[in-house]
Image: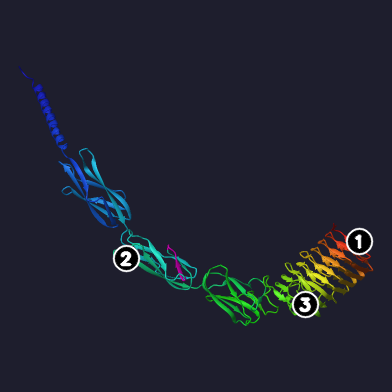
Amino acid sequence: MKINTINAKKLFMFLLSLLAVLCMFSVSGIQTDAASKSYVKSLTLSKTSVSLKANKTLTVKAAVKVKGSASKYVTVKSSNTSVATVTVGKPSSGVSKITIKGKSKGTATITVTTKGKNSKKSKISKKIKVTVAYANVTGLKVSPAGATKKVGDKFTITPKVTPSAANKGVTYKSSNTAVAAVSSSGVVEAVGAGKATITVTTKGKNSSGNKISKKVTVTVENNDCEASSINISVSGGGALVQGESSAVVTFRMAEACSAVNVKLLNESGAAVYETTLTNVAKDTDTTVTWSPSAAIAAGKYKVSITAGSITTAPEDAVITLYEQVFADGNGSSSNPFLVSTYAQFCRIGGFPACCFKQTADISAEYGNSIGVFSESAPLTGVYDGNGHTISDLFIQNASVNGAALFNYIGEGGTVRNLTLNNIYTTGIREAAILVYHNSGTISNCKVTSCNANTSGNYDVHSAVLAVYNESTGKISGCAVTDSTVASAVGWQDNKIGGLVCENKGSMINSAISTSKITGSVTYGWVRAGMISSQNSGRLINCKATDCTIVTSSKNMDYSGRICSCNTGVITSCSFIDGTTSLTADVGQQNGTVQ
């Protein structure tokens, strides 16, 4: 039987391929059997927790035990490479060296993992806890190394600690905080003139276990500056009196100054008082107290303030020191001048803003007076008669239009608790016994047996308590008895009041009794009223009892028993049991009577 050649070749090739496949499966089976007998048995670390400093390294050994031909290599990984980095070398006899390097303070975890797997087909991992401390300090630089500043200036010290992995913290300390103070952040403030050393010290230590320090020298110079404001006043008010009171100098400096010299200069320029203040702040009220003794001469004293090379001495920073011309006191509300003689009373006009207290009855022994306090310097303080009397006095002044015992009481001024007796005015066109112009307060004052006489060619005005009670004036609780007001005028106006002549303010609960007012005019008008000649303010509960009114005029008589001319308010006022030919309580009524 004949075999086809072509078929024979195909059969040969098939058998050859089949043999190759059988061989392949045979080899694979051998290899699989070998692999199943090789694996990682264990991973052991020489350390699982380490500590080191930054920029330092250490080694941990990783031992891998295997069966068969399993890999003994391991891989490593850091959880925080900014704290610690890690590398691993080739294994020798199954042991690999793991190198850990500290980078900065902190903690990290190194994970070590086998490349091969265990019998359960899993890789084995172990962890190393790494704690890194600061590196040793190797150097410290500070900037600036020194500084010259003016008082009040500030600057910052900048430290540089090396290496960068070391503790960068530093502390600051001044050798003299009165010259230069330093904060915990290195901000230096120039406090006072002088020199100070700022010591900068590292918080970390070097390899020898010591901290490193650097010094910054600070020179502070005083500012050359002026005082932006200066004021001098009497402590507690009143007047500056030798041995009695103190003056307070209050000033502000335009810049902070370590030393400010304050002087009080007399009118010759000589210093009678001097002090130096240290560490004066900018734009802050600073005070100095001067208590002149009786040995310091009376006169004017000027404040002089010097800082550096600049002196400030304004012309208005002046105070007057007075001799003690009263019985005691300094004119303050708590320590009033005590007045016990007529000579002392005559001096009160020189202290218009002060307080006075009369301590005895005073007789002027029928001397002459032009009155106290002027229009330019009215009483703005307090005169307390303290229940005492001033008596036996003539008030006359041909050089002025009007006068009274107190010529002018200003707003805020007060006269109270005073009795006047046997006081007479003469030769004056406008006059009163107590007050000429009142813009303040008169209370609880009494006038008895006094005579206000006035005369002139025109516009004669007179009364007992006040010629003019101005719009801010207030009179209360005052009484007039057994007194007279008499005036005569050639022509034009003649105004006569029992209590006040012209009232623009208020008069309350005041009375006049057993007294007489007389007014005459040759050519003009007479305007008389027992309470007030003219009222544009308020008259409340004021009474005239058993009084006499006598008036005469060739022209017009506008007089009234209570008031001549009313454009204000009159409340509960009366004229009782008096003697007069007048029938109307108000001569000209254009206001309110109730």
Residue at 48% in and 72% down? 192
Q: Locate the N terminus by quadrant.
A: top left
Does the image show residue 402?
A: no
Give the colour scheme shown. Answer: rainbow
Residue name at image x 91 percent, y 70 percent: 521
Most foreground residue, 428 or 382 = 382
In the rendered structure, which disc, 1 or 2, sits on the residue that comes first in sequence? 2
Q: Which residues are magenta?
A: 178-185
Q: Name the foreground residue: 94 vs 560.
A: 560
Tell me if 492 is positioned left or right of 251 in this view.
Answer: right
Specify the label residue 210 is tagged with: 2
- Residue pushed farthest top? 1
Q: Could you give the CA–CA distance between mark 1 and mark 3, rounded to whole angstroms?
A: 41 Å
The answer to whether residue 183 is magenta is: yes
Instruction: Give the SS element for disc 2.
Output: loop
Amino acid of disc 2: Asn
Q: Amino acid at mark 1?
A: Ala
Residue 560 image offset from top left, x and y in percent: 89, 63
How far separated are the C-alphas under marks 1 and 2?
110 Å
Regarding mark 3 in the picture, which secondary structure is present there?
strand
60 in relation to 399, above or below: above
The answer to whether the residue labelled 1 contacts the one labelled 3, judged by CB atoms less than 8 Å apart, is: no
In which quadrant of the rendered view does residue 336 lie? bottom right
The numbered mark, 3 or 2, whose residue comes first in the sequence reads: 2
- Asked which secondary structure carries label 1, the reply is loop
Whichever of labels 1 and 3 marks the residue nearer the N terminus, that label is: 3
Q: Which residue is mark 3?
A: 362
For disc 1, the marked residue is 584
